[in-house]
Image (cartoon, rainbow, N blue to C red):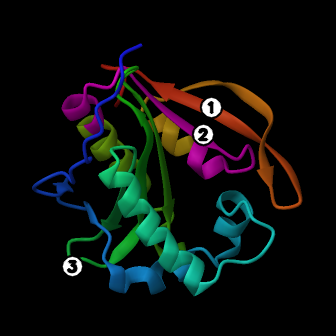
Amino acid sequence: MSEQTVSPLAFPEPPLSDGVIMLRPWRREEDGVRYEAFTDPVIVETSWPWSEPPTPEKIASAFDRHERDRLAGHELNLAITDPDDAVLGSMCLYNLDRDHATASIGYWLTRAARGHGYATRALRLLGGWAMAELGLARLQLTCDPRNEASQRVAERCGFVREGLLRSQYAWKDGRRDTLVFSVLPGELV
């Protein structure tokens, strides 16, 4: 295995857009939107692994951590916005492994943005960009088995369900199973 050269992961320029949504860098002043999302019961149940509730301070520190990870070449966090620049949710490319040409991708939507196809559009945009610009050979997506909406988004975009990882994550005060999906070049729809 070759030693990876650490280089920052650049934000797509211009921001990715399909005319309905845009993916752009998060702004520090949007921490309140992120905090509100992570206090939503749906996101707390399926995307917040800690037993203690989110705090504004924890959300603010995540912004700094995401930027450190981007500069280290491992992760790219983007806001999903509408044409008026209102935040609808988030897309994240993470666990980027350039030696193996693989990465993981994840997303969440605000309560008001759910059910409009925004996650599907965002997954297609960032997934297509990652395959083309980063030369990925595999893009992986994981989700809580109870998160049926996330599973439908993955399948609509051509991701194939590979299986269930039992007791994969420490989750709140126990463990959580995880569903694994993947897409290979030419499969994203």
Q: CA distance from mark 1 to mark 3?
A: 34 Å
The quadrant in which the C terminus is found is top left
The residue sitting at 25% across, 42% down in the picture is: 7
The residue sitting at 75% across, 49% down in the picture is: 146
The residue sitting at 32% across, 25% down in the picture is: 136
142 vs 45: above or below: above
Residue pointed to by mark 2: 142
Q: Which residues are magenta?
A: 130-151
Please, what is the three-letter code of the amino acid marked with disc 1?
Val
Residue pointed to by mark 3: 84
Residue pointed to by mark 1: 180
Q: Is residue 141 left or right of residue 88?
A: right
For the question of whether residue 117 can be seen, the reply is no
Please, what is the three-letter code of the amino acid marked with disc 2?
Thr
Q: Are marks 2 and 1 in contact (CB under 8 Å)?
A: yes
Q: Position of residue 58 (x, y in %)?
A: 59, 77
Question: Secondary structure beneath disc 3?
Answer: loop
